[in-house]
Amino acid sequence: MSVVGVIGAGAMGRGIAQVAATAGWEVQLFDIDDKVTEEAMAFIQKMLNRSVEKGRITDQDYRAITSRIYTTNSYEAFAECDMVIEAIVENLEIKQQVFKAVEKVVTGECILATNTSSLSVASIGSACEDPTRVCGIHFFNPPVLMKLVEIIPAVQSSNEVVNQANDWIRSWGKLTVLAKDTPGFIVNRVARPFYGEALRIYEEGIANPETIDWVMTEKAGFRMGPFTLMDYIGHDVNYKVTSTVYEAFYYDQRYKPSFAQKSLVDAGYLGRKSGQGFYNYGENEQAKNINKNEALAKEILERIVVMLINEAADALFWNVASANDIELAMTKGVNYPKGLLAWANEIGIQNCVDRLDALYDLYREDRYRCSPMLRRMGVEKSSFRL
């Protein structure tokens, strides 16, 4: 039986543990706090019980899966692991310390992976004596439900390690995409305008969160509007990712964080988990005030969607991932109603270019610069090949 170690028994770690155990792997679930691992096991058992009640698995499956998960507070438990996946706080120094310590325990063949969503995999791997064994394996929350996993080779990663990690994660029933080790990888890079441009529209006073969310769900077909989604993710988490990507891209204005979101974080209004974000989730929840003006809806939809398309095109321009992997990442990773490159073909490449140029002419801000990929395709009157 293959063995995986999972470092961190929080929301991501316990989800990864459940996925691996369900796929037949033995899991060593580590956390420095025994209470956290106890809570993690209770949560996993609760989720599996629900699956039994819904007929998705049998009682025998439940017993088999839970019997494959062991909890520990010592790295020594990783001695026989084939792979170790780190899923702890997004802090580079702490991650490097963990990788240094774990490398001393595992075998020379053990793959060391990070579940980081925004930090450099190369920087994390540099802490190891053998960085060729390190790669990124980025699950999405909740790991049990989300099919997509980004596989990220660092510049030091060996092809064998990347290919093996990819094969193993696919054997767990996941869809994988290959992403370059650049800030945000695919999803957290390409998705930034979904939040950033919505926040900009709100900060300009063009529309309130309720209206923007209504447009993006009812008119554009997204499962959640940007403000509802930010409240769900948690503003501390979402703002941190935005800030990390912004800094990593040398303060490129396309990724600039929002003062409106920073104010919520500073106030402790983190969204659903605190009871207050852009919306109030307490007893005094207010009725939504939605402006359904068609012209306004069209402006909001076009502005956010064209910025998303521009980001996807730029990711392709910079070889962050293949066109097909970008489409798969955005439809399966964050459940977009359609692939952004396909959406660009539908709208018309030149129409996207014209809309971006109009925004740039209005604001004269670099955030609205058109990707060279889009502009070139507009001149050539071509479409994305998918």
Image (cartoon, helix red, strand yellow):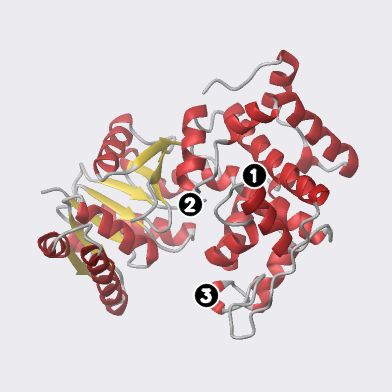
- Vertical placement of residue 171 versus 195, above or below: above
Q: Amino acid at mark 1?
A: Phe
Please report the residue visible at 76 percent of the width from the left and 57 percent of the height from the top. 292
245 relative to 63 in the view: left or right:
right
Q: Position of residue 52 (x, y in %)?
A: 20, 64
Q: Amino acid at mark 2?
A: Ser
Q: Quadrant of residue 51?
A: bottom left
205 relative to 55 in the view: left or right:
right
- Vertical placement of residue 376 versus 331, above or below: above
Label 1: state its secondary structure: loop
> Neighbour class for label 1 at 10 Å: few (<14), some, many (≥20)?
some
Please report the residue visible at 74 percent of the width from the left and 31 percent of the height from the top. 352
Residues 385 and 158: in front is 385
Label 3: state its secondary structure: helix
Q: Which mark is residue 273?
A: 3
User: Which residue is denoted by mark 1 in the rendering?
Assistant: 249
User: Which residue is denoted by mark 2 in the rendering?
Assistant: 117
